[in-house]
Amino acid sequence: MRTAGDAAPLELCIDSKAYLAADGTPVEVVRGLKLRLEAGAFGALIGPSGCGKTTILKIAAGIDPDFRGDIRTPGAGRLGIVFQEPRLLPWRTVEQNIRLALPAEDTTTDLTELVEVLGLSSHLARYPGELSLGLARRAAIARAFAMQPDFLLLDEPFVSLDETIAARLRDELLALTKRTRVTTLFVTHDLEEAIQLSDRLFFLSDRPTHIIFEKALLLPRGTRNKEVIASISEEMRALVAQAATGAGQS
Amino acid sequence: MTRIYSLAILIAAWAVTAALVQSRLLPGPLTVGTTILAEVRSGELPFHMACTLGRVISSFAIAMTLGIIAGYVMGRSKTADRYADPWLVVLINMPALVTIIFAYVWIGLNEAAAILAVAVNKLPNVVVIMREGARALDPELDEMAKAFKFTRLTRARHVILPQFAPYLAACSRSGLSIVWKIVLVVELIGRPNGVGFVLGSAFSLFDMAQILSYAISFIVLMLVIEGYLVQPLERRANRWRRRPA
């Protein structure tokens, strides 16, 4: 993984990504995907389930080097990531889980504020097995933010949460990303969620995945109310349908 | 409590049988008890037990260290597993006695040969269990560790070792008992001290009281190690698991 200066954009260029299925035949998941996201922006990848969103995220995270193409990540390589499942170490307390992800030079970072914002203060000494899914997700989000990342990846962090908790966590995420101005790539299949949170939307096709079209949202993040989100999402759905029928001409 | 009753019944049965038989070949608990006391006073018993315990600890440590490394590599790499598996099968099926004879013949009748022979006997068992442990490592946590750029040390200590804990407990449990039994054989054949050596000379004299007193003393010692070292360590490693309600 190459990293550039602080204000560098995120550039993903995946010519092809395939994996071997259980019976040994190669399955192509991504083909000809090009994505560019300005430094400090929040981008959302939106696509149907199973279209390879997680695969793209893993490539961006540098976890999966087995693909053809080229990636440039913003910042100096401080990557924060929130997986779909919280992926906390069950044998370490919440606080240890957060601290273990900190770079070696700042293991003594003060976590008080972050932990407070995410409502984890009274749970720091507990083990992940004792937490509800909502709290475990918060712990995972805290872990990604604690290191003050300059590149943040989130993989559907709010699925299977009940809607009120998801809404609160979305607000918290919005506040944290606005304050830290971290370049963020967010994966979701929920269009409203994407519109509420992002600066730029990337719509993905079915496998092999590529970007059907992208859309910059002009109204600043966090100022969009329910009606605005509903009208934008209607507009987007129409555009996606149009792009799908006129495939290739976008 | 039940354990104590159960043991008491065993000792009582032994005492009754010994009283009925009235033979030098089956001494009663009292005779064995006085023999143990006499041996402790003379310093013989602590000395031989210490020799044996030293060998148990060294060969156990060697077998565990090498076994964990080999098991980890074989569990993680299919190629390594394919190449090393036949060796493992040979080693597992090698009779303990053969390994011991080879070690004494090739290396000599010395401490190194004794410890090595025991370690080699225990090794394949550790490899097999740890290989399963390595195969069961959670790939999702692996990715997490990679994404957050955990150092090797952090990964080993906080991600891998806790996942190995149940497997390590299984190896240590079965390992300690196997190792101490083989150490006695090694001592019987080629060492001038240790519990195995004493048992050998007592056997040639048909001194059953001596044999029973040493055997019982060592069993008690191993129970103490199990209860005061292995079990507390296991409890510590498992403290994050929720208590079953």
Image (cartoon, rainbow, N blue to C red):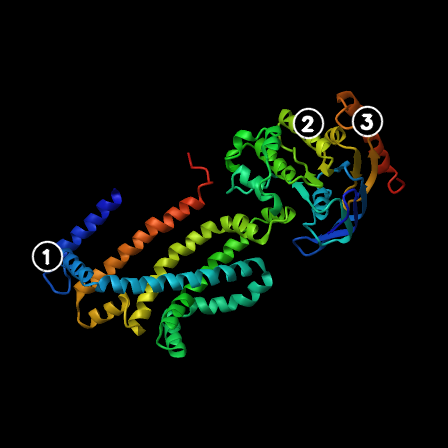
Give the mark, 3 or 2, whose residue is nearer the N terminus.
Answer: 2
User: Quadrant location of residue A250?
Assistant: top right
How far is mark 1 from mark 2, CA to CA? 83 Å
Q: Amino acid at mark 1?
A: Ala
Residue A32, x across and y down, in percent: 81, 48
Q: Are marks 3 and 2 in contact (CB under 8 Å)?
A: no
Residue A1, x across and y down, in percent: 73, 52
Out of A125 and B117, give the one closest to the viewer. Answer: A125
State whether residue A84 appears in this view: no
Instruction: Specify the quadrant that holds the N terminus of chain B.
Output: top left
Judge the density around disc 1: few (<14), some (14-19), many (≥20) Cα neighbours within 10 Å: some
Label 2 resides on the chain identified as A
Out of B178 and B159, give the one closest to the viewer. Answer: B159
How far is mark 3 from mark 2, CA to CA? 17 Å
Which residue in the structure is indicated by mark 3? A219
Which residue in the structure is indicated by mark 2? A171
How far is mark 3 from mark 1, CA to CA? 98 Å
Which residue in the structure is indicated by mark 1? B19
Q: Residue at x 17, y 67 (%)?
A: B207
Label 3 resides on the chain identified as A
Residue A142, x across and y down, in percent: 62, 36
Tell whether A157 sits left or right of B15: right
